[in-house]
Image: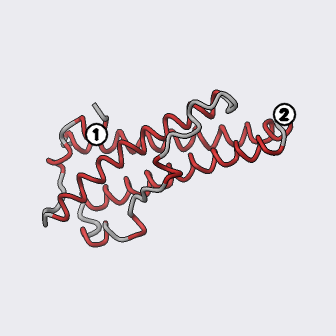
Amino acid sequence: MPKATTLLDRTFDEGVALTQEVRNYIAYHEQADRREFELSRCLHVGYQHTRISARLIQVMTWLLAMKALLSGEISPEQFTAPQYALTDSEECSSDKGETDEEMPAGLRDLLMRSHALYARIKRLDDMVKAKLEAGEVPNFAMLTGANIISGD
C-alpha cells in the first residue's frame, strides 16, 4: 500500500474518531449543560457544538471525495463540484472559542482539535486545487509528504 494511502487513511480515521467523540460529548453534556447553565450560555455552547459539527462534516465529506478521486471513482470535475467543496466559512476557519474560559474544558479541547484537523485539510485542499487548476490530476505521489497532512 502506498505511503499516501496510509496518510490519507490515518487522517480519515482521525476524522471518524473525532466525529464519534464529538457525538458522544454532545449527547452526554448537552442535557447536563442545560441544567447547569443559564439560557445565554447554553445558546453559546450550542453554537460551538454546531461549529464543531460543521467543521467535521466539511472535513469528512472532503476526505471521502478525495479518496474517491484518488481511486478513480469520481472525476476531477466531480471532485470540484460544490457538494464536495471545502467551504472556507468563518464558522469553520476561526479559532474563536478555543480559549474562552467560560466554555467547558472538554468543549474547548474539541474546538481546538476540530480546528486543527480542518486547517490541515484546508492546506491539502489548496494544494489539490492548485494541481487541478494546472491541469494535473492529483495522485498518491503528491501526498507522500507527511507535512501536507500532519501540518509538520
Q: Which residue is at the front of the view, 116 or 94?
A: 94
Q: Position of residue 81 (x, y in %)?
A: 35, 71
Residue 137: image quadrant is: bottom left
Residue 62: image quadrant is: bottom left
In the displayed structure, does residue 128 sit left or right of residue 41?
left
Q: Which residue is mark 2?
A: 36
**Between marks 2 and 1, how big is the CA–CA gap?**
41 Å
Are the residues flagged by discs 2 and 1 in contact, CB closer than 8 Å?
Answer: no
Q: Position of residue 133 (x, y in %)?
A: 18, 65
- Identified at 37% across, 53% down, the residue is 63
Q: Is residue 41 above or below residue 60?
A: above
Residue type, mark 2 in image: Glu
In the displayed structure, does residue 89 sit left or right of residue 31?
left
Q: Which residue is at the front of the view, 99 or 69?
A: 99
> Which element carries disc 1, helix, strand or loop?
helix
- N-term mark: 2 or 1: 1
In the displayed structure, does residue 55 sit left or right of residue 66?
right
Q: Position of residue 2 (x, y in %)?
A: 18, 43
Q: Residues within 10 Å of mark 1 (few under 14, many from 20)?
A: some
Q: Quadrant of the C terminus?
A: top left
Q: Which residue is at the front of the view, 128 or 44?
A: 44
- Identified at 43% across, 68% down, the residue is 83
Q: Which residue is at the front of the view, 143 or 123?
A: 123
Q: Residues within 10 Å of mark 2 (few under 14, many from 20)?
A: few
Q: Which residue is mark 1?
A: 7
> Which element carries disc 2, helix, strand or loop?
helix
Q: Quadrant of the N terminus?
A: top left
Q: Position of residue 59 (x, y in %)?
A: 43, 51
